[in-house]
Amino acid sequence: MAKVIKRFRDKETGKIHNKGTDYNGTPERIKVLQEKGFLEGELKVLSDNEVIETIQEDGIDINELTIKQLHEFAEQIDVEIPKEITKRDDIIEFLSDKSD
């Protein structure tokens, strides 16, 4: 069992899990959700080189993404964009700084 720290819909069950509730699942599923930042536990933090490799491997040009897509991309590579960064250009700069 693990505590939910970010609301999410479980893609395997379709059930919505709200922040502050307990999540019951297999150890493997809990680990995946911890790595994605939905459950308490260790978070995987990518190094700058890993961010660069992910961008290059995926062939992503972040300059062509919408704000929503930038947030989704950041989530996929386990990078948390600070809440105070809200403008598209600022998000791109933040993500680009992660890859320098």
Image: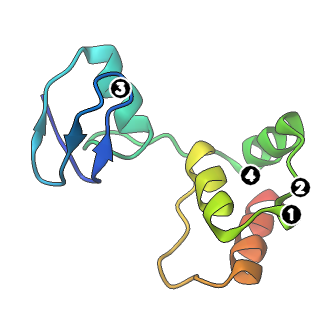
In space, the residues marked 2 and 1 are separated at their CA atoms by 6 Å
Q: Nearer the viewer, residue 100 or 32?
A: 32
Tag 2 and tag 1, C-beta contact below 8 Å:
yes
Residue mark closest to the camera, 2 vs 4:
2
Circle 2: residue type? Asp
Question: Which residue was labeled with disc 3?
Answer: 31
Q: Where 19 sits versus 9, above or below?
A: below
Residue at x-position 49% and y-position 40%: 44
Question: Which residue was labeled with disc 1?
Answer: 64
Secondary structure beneath disc 1?
A: helix
Secondary structure beneath disc 2?
A: loop
Which is more N-terminal, label 1 or label 4? 4
Residue 7 numbered mark, or none? none
Circle 4: residue type? Asp
In space, the residues marked 3 and 4 are separated at their CA atoms by 23 Å
In space, the residues marked 2 and 3 are separated at their CA atoms by 30 Å
Residue mark closest to the camera, 3 vs 1:
1
Horizontal and vertical percent for residue 86? 58, 82
Question: Which residue was labeled with disc 4?
Answer: 48
Horizontal and vertical percent for residue 94? 71, 72
Question: Which residue was labeled with disc 2?
Answer: 61
